[in-house]
Structures are given as structure tokens and as C-alpha cells.
Image (cartoon, rainbow, N blue to C red):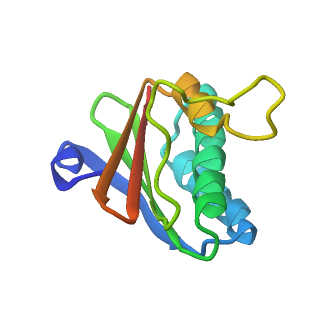
Amino acid sequence: MSGSELRPHHVVLDREYDGTTSTLRAARTDMVACLNRENLNEDLLERAELVLSELASNAVQASPGNPYKLRLALAADGSLVMALTSHTCNGGPPPRRPWGPSFVLAPSGRGLMIVDALSDRVNVQRPAEDTVVVTATLR
């Protein structure tokens, strides 16, 4: 989430987590607790939890040991804007068109496809060579 994207939004969570699988549950727990305080509907909460699980898992898998940052904001229209920033030495996500597994029985490759299906809008930015920011907007 860039500064211009945040102006009309109210940031409700801004945390960094260690880049290990042991932090995935903490990130989900923090997000759910935060969003429960905001009285969002159950459908939005469930989709947000799945989106976060996919994005954080992707970040840890792409660059183990490197921290990732979660930022949540609420827009005036009730949308949830989730940005996950990660640092990677393995390039970035694939271009949008091939989001999904390379073949039906592939053991991985579905994360961004799932995020895209659960979100109203997904934006991937590369503000630096080693940085990826995936922003998902859920209504």
C-alpha cells in the first residue's frame, strides 16, 4: 500500500513478522482479532483469512527467513485493503496471466490464483528489485 492508497483509508494493523512458517498463525490471529473489533461481516473475515494465509505462505516459501509485513486498512466504503510486503532473492511472482499451477496435479502454484478469486482487486508491485508488495482489496 503506497502512501497515496492509504490516504482515504484507516490503517487498523501494521506489523512485521519473521519469515518462518511458525509466524503464519500469529499473523492470522492478529488479523482476525483486529477485524473482529471492526465488526466486519463473516464472509469478508473468512475471505481475508484465506487471502492472508496464501500471501504469507507465499512470502515465507519464496524467501525463507526474510521478514514480511502485513498492513490492513479499512476504506470509507467498507472495503478491506490488505498489503503484504516481502523481500525476496528469488525474483517475484509470475505475471498475472499464468497465475495458477503449471499443470492440474502440481503440488504448488495456486496461491495468487486463490487470492485473485477471493479478492475484488489484486495489485502486485515491485518497488525495489528485492521487494514485492501484493495488495488485495476485499469488499
Number of labels in the image equals 0
Residue 72 in the image: x percent, y percent? 42, 51
* In this rendering, position of residue 19 left or right of residue 138: right
Q: Quadrant of the C terminus?
A: top left
Q: Is residue 110 above or below residue 59?
A: above
Q: Is residue 34 above or below residue 42?
A: below
Q: Position of residue 29 (x, y in %)?
A: 67, 58
- Report the residue at 44% width, 23% height from top: 120
Q: Where does the image place residue 4, in percent across and percent down from the top left?
A: 15, 48
Residue at 49% across, 65% down: 88
Residue in view at x 57 percent, y 54 percent: 31
Left/right of residue 79 with respect to residue 48 in the rendered view: left
Tell me which corner region of the image, top left, top right, bottom left or bottom right, holds residue 11: bottom left
Above or below residue 41? Residue 60 is: below
Q: Quadrant of residue 42 in the image?
A: top right
- Residue at 48% from the left image edge and 45% from the top image edge: 38
* Residue 92 drawn at (x, y percent): 46, 52
